[in-house]
Amino acid sequence: MSVVTTHLTEGVLIVRTDNPPVNALGQAVRAGLEAAISGAASDKNIEAIVLICSGRTFFAGADITEFGKPAQSPDLNDVCAVIEALNKPVIAAIHGTALGGGLEIALSCNYRVAVPSAKLGFPEVKLGLLPGSGGTQRLPRLIGVPEALTMIGLGEPVDARKALEIVLLDRIVGEDSLESDAVAFAREVALNKSHPVTSQLTHRTQRDDIDSNTYDQFLKSNARKLRGLEAPQACVEAVRAAVELPFPEGLRKEREQFIRLMNGPQSKALRHVFFAERTASRIEGIPDDTPTIPIEKVGVLGAGTMGGGIAMNFLTAGIPVTLIEREKASLDRGVATIRKNYEATASKGRLTTEQVERAMNLLTPSLQFDDLADCDLVIEAVFENMDLKLEVFARLDATIKQGAILASNTSYLSIDEMAGATARPEYVIGLHFFSPANVMKLLEVVRGAKTSATVLKTCMGLARMIGKVAAISGVCYGFIGNRMLSQRSQQAQALILEGAKPWDVDRVLTRFGFPMGPFQMSDLAGLDIGWNAKTSKSSTVREVLCERGRLGQKTGSGYYDYDENRKGHPSEETEAIIAELVAKSGRNQRSIGDEEIFERLLYPMVNEGAKILQEGIAQRASDIDVVWINGFGWPAYTGGPMYWADSIGLANIVRSLEANSVEVAPLLRAKSEAAESFIQK
Ligand code: 3H9
């Protein structure tokens, strides 16, 4: 059956697209739409047209799998032009998400109606692109430059309420009556003498009405979010063209930029990330019909920063949480922090007061371990010590109902050992959240040797429900993320003893695109994590810093000196501490260039990634990319460590590792010698 079908009702032609899963605008859809619209032009029985989609969403955009392949006609611009040129009103009837090319289709229509839960947006910038079928030209003409810049330049969708407010929508219709309400709307507007044609609107894009600083100001005020990305600049230039050039010329300019970006390295990398994030949720080797466990109540053990952040994920998703602490003061502090975090989000307008109260009402704080008994999932976030974890797991096993999942938020320790402390190892799993747990996207799901397929599948589904990007890791010290991080940390420590300055190391990484370097990160986290004053032997830079009370940002000094605005400055005292340690060791320092720092920090991580892959700790190379982008701030526009390694050339990496006396992982060597890559392109 065709993906686009039509039927006529009361003089309104309903053009319905059904192209699961998200009605992407692949060639068959474009051809179907063009034929349906063109055919309607001369049919006297048709007074108006409604474009509507089946399934979970309106068109979610161009079919990304077609990018980079030879173009197939008709292209989306042609379809938009045909819609806009029709001599009868066309109405977009939107549910789910109208994204990218989907919104471009909607903008080409004369009118747009949507259900209250619909979202509309241009996420192209997140794929390293700009809207390429007239979106940058039509949107400013319809809603004005400031709103268009935000939507196109940042890529965040707007909800139906906001869309109506900015006149992107003409009407919000009934959640369950989209088709009939859209037909009624079509019959209403069919009586109008003329219909708005978006490309011909001029009232919002008068050059004299727009402050010429608007464009630069947008880039400046979003500089942190947009750092390193090429596409936002092109988005802004295209919106400017909507003001300064006639429509056909603006369209040509947009097209040029779209093609340039689509063929450029950043968009290719970001498209890899898009598919990698979706592939990561697939579990190798388990049957599709594996059942899952309904999770209706979650327990979190430990109300510290981590436990509180973990709890917020479930509360926000509407799942009741019992939060357990041993001492009342810690429990009260934990609950107060959760409330404070929610209220901070509400004050930025991202939550309503009712949503805050709804989430808080789902929270049951308790000092009684037994209150966890009827939870379907309990996550422990207690101190990182194996003896303590073993005790906790034995107690959880004795207390929590049978059939419930027992999870650890450990960052390094063995899930198998913890499972061994219970009589239900198949129900034990690692759920490793990243700090701040209510914000960071990544969830490392750690599969123990005995974790059942049901438990694994339940947790992957749950991750999606709470808005996390999940990747599966096998059991090893530090799992995927921290195991690779420790390679980088070792190199960073070695580099500052050999002669590089901590701020040189940080600069090299931030220039590459990380939000912070390792020493800035340590100062932020606190240098005393895991440090013990009684056993400290002044043997490492960190130990000496801690001994001198330089514990990081919180004490105003660590590797860096901090001013009253918490801005870090290179520290002479740190340099002196390093110099003393080096002198004691009898070694000499030398000057180390940025290139060496860069290679020594990043290549050993790729090497460790290859080992992780070979050992089967990661299911696939792209999962490693997902972990590093979502958990550690690796710049997404480079595709993640394994994709990036391919682009550097594996032979170059092997050569550099050898020169720096790092043992090369057999898989990396084999791939390099066979001229293979980690990621199949
Ligand atoms: C664009 O439009 C450019 C134009 O301006 C110009 C053109 C000339 N194409 O995310 P999910 C697949 S650029 C192909 O899990 P959800 C996805 O891979 C595009 N495939 O669902 C997955 O496959 P699988 C601008 C796509 O319900 C399956 O659909 N649009 C596309 O959580 C389900 O996806 C975007 O960037 C696509 N466009 O979320 C929107 N989209 O099952 C991208 C999805 O095999 N899409 N797939 O793993 C999304 O943001 C989400 O998919 C959406 C649904 C919110 C729609």
Image (tube, helix red, strand yellow):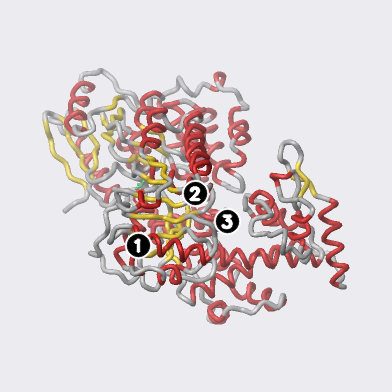
**Residue type, label 1:** Ala
- Whether label 3 lies within 8 Å of ligand 1 gets the answer no
The crowd level at tag 3 (other Cα within 10 Å; few <14, some 14-19, many 20+) is: many
Quarter residue 392 falls in: bottom left
Q: Is residue 231 visible?
A: yes
Residue at left offset 35%, top offset 55%: 377
Name the residue tied to disc 1.
Answer: 398
Above or below, comparing residue 579 to residue 341 in the picture: below
Residue at left offset 31%, top offset 25%: 170
The reply to whether discs 3 and 1 touch (Cβ–Cβ < 8 Å) is no
The crowd level at tag 1 (other Cα within 10 Å; few <14, some 14-19, many 20+) is: some
Gap in angstroms between the C-alphas marked 3 and 1: 41 Å
Gap in angstroms between the C-alphas marked 1 and 2: 28 Å
Q: Residue 426 appears at what percent x and percent y? A: 33, 69
Gap in angstroms between the C-alphas marked 3 and 2: 18 Å
The crowd level at tag 2 (other Cα within 10 Å; few <14, some 14-19, many 20+) is: many
Quarter residue 51 falls in: top left
Q: Counting residues from the N terminus, which is met first, the one under dot 3 or under dot 2?
A: 2
Which is more toward the observer, 386 or 491? 386
Which is more toward the observer, 420 or 501? 420
Above or below, comparing residue 353 to residue 132 in the picture: above
Residue at left offset 48%, top offset 77%: 615
Q: Secondary structure at mark 2?
A: loop
Residue at left offset 41%, top offset 60%: 407
Q: Secondary structure at mark 1?
A: helix
Which is more toward the observer, 289 or 227? 289
- Whether label 2 lies within 8 Å of ligand 1 gets the answer no
**Residue type, label 2:** Ala
**Residue type, label 3:** Trp
Q: Tell me, for residue 437, which label it has, or none.
A: 2
Q: Residue 65 appears at what percent x and percent y? A: 38, 57
Name the residue tied to disc 3.
Answer: 634
